[in-house]
Image (cartoon, coloured by chain):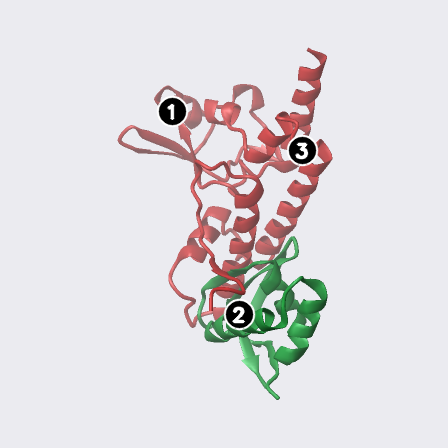
């Protein structure tokens, strides 16, 4: 099972519950919205997509298929920017 | 009349608790009227002129403990400028406490930035560093921290302090759940 976790090369700052993060090797800053920030909080520890979606579905009014698709898309973006690694 | 005075008092209380428009957190410089050049120079301000565009550089060295030391004699931009937060207070859209809380949050983000700045680097210089090209190998982590905290502060200032007509210094790229 693939587990997602914050990259050790990522540094971040929290502003009113939302995060700004940057990969120190890339130098581009990224601002996260509230849902992306929730995912960012969750992946402080390694998490599977299933685990992340279960948590999000308990918080937000979202159907499982949409949630999974959105989380996959988000994790793909975060991985591409070097902010998330997999185990 | 009494209500006007209360509003003025609240505004004054907010401004002396803040100082972000004077210490370089919000702006790199402030525009001067041509007839104020001699006043600004006499006050020791660093004045730059490009054609008809005259400015003095920030941070202002006349700010001490978040108070203007030449308040009665300050130039017109200092008299006339109102940040968005002050405007929301004056329009009764926010309470003084709500505004003070936002100043406190901004100051906390500013403190995070100042903690990672080299000695003597001003906030405008930090912004310029953050907006410059990708982090170089020399002190990569240190530069990355400056950039991160400069951006974080900027996001907050954009949200609550800068007016729409004012420059946005730094841009973040948005990541949300739909941008795959």
B88 with respect to B168 (left or right): right
Q: Nearer the viewer, mark 2 or mark 1?
A: 2
Q: Secondary structure at mark 1?
A: helix
* Residue occupying the far top of the picture: B1
Among the chains pictured, the one given green colouring is A
Q: Position of residue A74 (x, y in %)?
A: 53, 70
Residue B37 is marked as 1
* Left or right: B5, with A13 as reference point: right
Specify whether residue A9 is in view.
Answer: no
Q: Which percent across, then down, holds residue B162?
A: 51, 39
Q: Are marks 3 and 1 on the same chain?
A: yes
Q: Residues within 10 Å of mark 1 (few under 14, many from 20)?
A: many
Q: Position of residue A2 (x, y in %)?
A: 59, 86
Give the quarter of the figure containing the C terminus of chain A: bottom right
Whether A86 is drawn above or below B175: the answer is: below
> Rounded to the nearest whole Å, what is the CA distance between mark 2 and mark 1?
52 Å
Q: Residues within 10 Å of mark 3 (few under 14, many from 20)?
A: some
Q: Which mark is residue B5?
A: none
**Dot 2 corresponds to which residue?**
A74
**Residue drawn where x is 47% and y is 39% of the image:** B58
Q: What x and y, as percent, mark residue A20?
A: 56, 60
- Circle 3 is placed at which residue position? B94
Judging from the image, mark 3 belongs to the subunit labelled B
Q: Earlier in the sequence, mark 3 or mark 1?
A: 1
Q: Which chain is red?
A: B
> Could you tell me how far apart the alpha carbons at marks 3 and 2 are, in whole angstroms?
35 Å
């Amino acid at each position: 099972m693939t587990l997602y976790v914050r990259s050790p090369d990522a540094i971040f700052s929290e502003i009113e519950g939302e995060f700004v993060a940057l990969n120190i090797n890339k130098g581009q800053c990224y601002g996260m919205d509230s849902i992306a920030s929730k995912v960012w909080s969750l992946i402080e520890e390694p998490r599977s997509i299933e685990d992340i979606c279960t948590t999000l579905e308990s918080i937000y009014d979202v159907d499982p298929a949409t949630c999974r698709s959105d989380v996959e898309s988000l994790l793909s973006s975060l991985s591409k920017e070097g902010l998330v690694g997999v185990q | 009349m009494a209500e006007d005075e209360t509003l003025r008092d609240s505004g004054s209380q907010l401004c002396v608790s803040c100082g972000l428009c004077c210490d370089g957190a919000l702006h790199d410089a402030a525009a001067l009227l041509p007839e104020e050049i001699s006043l600004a120079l006499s006050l020791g301000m660093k004045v730059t002129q490009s054609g008809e565009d005259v400015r003095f550089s920030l941070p202002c060295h006349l700010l001490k403990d978040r108070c203007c030391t030449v308040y009665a004699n300050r130039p017109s931009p200092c008299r006339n400028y109102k940040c968005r937060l002050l405007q929301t207070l004056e329009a009764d859209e926010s309470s003084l406490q709500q505004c003070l809380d936002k100043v406190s949050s901004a100051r906390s983000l500013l403190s995070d930035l100042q903690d990672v700045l080299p000695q003597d680097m001003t906030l405008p210089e930090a912004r310029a560093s953050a907006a410059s090209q990708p982090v170089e190998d020399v002190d990569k982590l240190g530069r990355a921290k400056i950039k991160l905290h400069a951006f974080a502060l900027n996001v907050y200032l954009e949200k609550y302090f800068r007016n729409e007509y004012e420059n946005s210094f730094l841009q973040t790229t948005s990541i949300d759940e739909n941008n795959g």
